[in-house]
Amino acid sequence: SKGIMSDKTARKENVGGEILCNIW
């Protein structure tokens, strides 16, 4: 489950980062 949480968190951060980059 730890790997899933890490993957989910990293994926969420990547998505947020891409969105922020697109907005900015």
Image: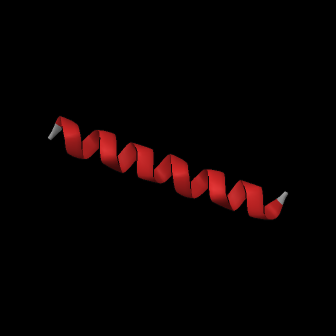
Residue 20 in the image, given as x and y percentages of width and height: 73, 55
Relative to 15, residue 3 above or below: above
User: Residue placed farthest to the right in the image?
Assistant: 24
Residue 23 in the image, given as x and y percentages of width and height: 80, 62
- Taking the spot 64% from the left edge, 58% from the top edge, the residue there is 18
The image quadrant that residue 6 belongs to is top left
State the count of labels: 0
Relative to 7, residue 18 above or below: below
Q: Is residue 2 left or right of residue 16?
A: left
Residue 14 in the image, given as x and y percentages of width and height: 53, 51
Quarter of the image with the C terminus in it: bottom right
- Taking the spot 22% from the left edge, 46% from the top edge, the residue there is 4
- Taking the spot 21% from the left edge, 40% from the top edge, the residue there is 3
Q: Is residue 9 left or right of residue 6?
A: right
Quarter of the image with the N terminus in it: top left
User: Residue placed farthest to the top in the image?
Assistant: 2
- Taking the spot 47% from the left edge, 52% from the top edge, the residue there is 12
Rendering colour mode: secondary structure
